[in-house]
């Protein structure tokens, strides 16, 4: 994906005189801040507001390359980083691709600090002005909506307590899947505080607690994990992979079998079982 994209403002609130400099600056500055927060997150540092470190500014440096007429469209490009060292591995490109892959929802793979900053853009614009951004070489544009609007459209938010197999753990993006009955798969998101637990419990049967949203079909859209624990498999479907990789398998020992101390009538036993089936 190329390193160029655009931020657009449109709507009836944009007349012949355009928009105010403050409104235009709020949109572009919001995307710049989101880029810096994303770079900081990808660099393994907690994304925080305020003055970012020099390496973050260097990797997320956006340049204004043009303004189009009609809608107010700012053409931006990712500048070439100057920093050499541990933070010169293209974090800016990774951050930009993450922003361009966003679905516009707060329950996404982006860190919450990043989506908070993006939603703040729309909150600073008049209600008659809509904000978009997207790659200049692709038709898809992402509308930046108010958080209130997204909550109304994104389904109800509720507490979650689920059990299943923890699969597809991605420690870079801090995402995973919970595989449940009937091939149901719930997308998960977790914070850095759970990195060790997610690594330890990967591929195991777990119980998670957190919060998430349902879609119109009453299916989980995504769940934010706040706590995760390993649980036993009592009553759960047999897992061959887990059985074969069990470090402490249960071994059958014939000499430890508890045998009947009195004579046992097998025919009578079978008769009682058959009668019980017909009850």
Image: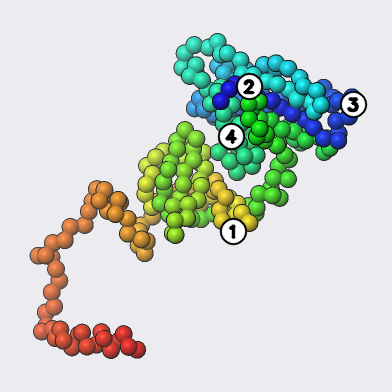
Q: Kindly identify which residue carries mark 4.
A: 101
The answer to whether the residue labelled 4 contacts the one labelled 3, judged by CB atoms less than 8 Å apart, is no
Residues 13 and 22: in front is 13
Q: Kindly identify which residue carries mark 1.
A: 218
Q: In whole angstroms, how far apart are the C-alphas of marks 2 and 4?
A: 14 Å
Q: Kindly identify which residue carries mark 3.
A: 16
Q: Secondary structure at mark 2?
A: strand
Residues 67 and 269: in front is 67
Q: In whole angstroms, how far apart are the C-alphas of marks 1 and 2?
A: 38 Å
Number of other residues with Cα within 10 Å of mark 1, as a class: few under 14, some 14 to 19, many 20 or more: few
- Determine whether 183 is above or below 279 in the image: above
Which image quarter holds the N terminus? top right
Res 271 label: none
Colour mapping: rainbow
Residue 128 sits in quarter: top right
Q: In whole angstroms, how far apart are the C-alphas of marks 3 and 2?
A: 27 Å
- Determine whether 273 is above or below 53 in the image: below
* Label whose residue precedes the other's in the sequence (1 or 3): 3
Q: Kindly identify which residue carries mark 2.
A: 4
Which residue is pictured at 60% across the width and 36% down the height?
Answer: 102
Which residue is pictured at 9% across the width and 65% down the height?
Answer: 255
Number of other residues with Cα within 10 Å of mark 3, as a class: few under 14, some 14 to 19, many 20 or more: few
The answer to whether the residue labelled 1 contacts the one labelled 3, judged by CB atoms less than 8 Å apart, is no
Which image quarter holds the C terminus? bottom left
Residue 261 sits in quarter: bottom left
* Label whose residue precedes the other's in the sequence (2 or 4): 2
- Determine whether 28 is above or below 172 in the image: above
- Total of numbered circles in the picture? 4
* Label whose residue precedes the other's in the sequence (3 or 2): 2
């Amino acid at each position: 994906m190329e390193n160029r994209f655009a931020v657009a403002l449109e709507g009836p609130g944009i007349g012949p005189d355009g928009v105010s400099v403050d409104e235009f600056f709020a949109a572009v500055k919001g995307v710049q801040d989101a880029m810096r927060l994303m770079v900081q997150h990808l660099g393994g540092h907690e994304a925080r507001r305020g003055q970012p470190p020099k390496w973050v500014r260097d990797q997320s440096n956006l340049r204004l390359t043009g303004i189009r007429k009609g809608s107010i469209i700012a053409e931006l490009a990712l500048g070439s980083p100057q920093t050499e060292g541990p933070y010169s591995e293209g974090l800016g490109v990774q951050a930009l691709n993450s922003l361009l892959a966003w679905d516009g929802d707060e329950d996404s793979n982006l860190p919450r600090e990043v989506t908070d900053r993006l939603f703040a853009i729309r909150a600073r614009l008049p209600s008659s002005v809509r904000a978009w951004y997207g790659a200049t070489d692709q038709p898809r544009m992402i509308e930046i909506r108010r958080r209130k609007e997204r909550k109304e459209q994104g389904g109800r938010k509720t507490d979650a307590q689920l059990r299943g197999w923890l699969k597809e753990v991605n420690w870079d993006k801090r995402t995973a899947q919970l595989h449940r009955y009937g091939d149901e798969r719930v997308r998960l998101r977790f914070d850095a505080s759970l990195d060790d637990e997610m690594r330890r419990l990967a591929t195991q049967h777990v119980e998670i607690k957190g919060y998430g949203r349902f879609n119109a079909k009453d299916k989980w859209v995504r769940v934010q994990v706040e706590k995760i624990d390993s649980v036993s498999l009592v009553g759960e479907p047999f897992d061959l992979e887990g059985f074969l990789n069990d470090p402490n398998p249960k071994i059958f020992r014939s000499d430890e079998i508890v045998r009947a101390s009195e004579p046992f009538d097998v025919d009578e036993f079978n008769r009682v079982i058959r009668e019980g089936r017909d009850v």
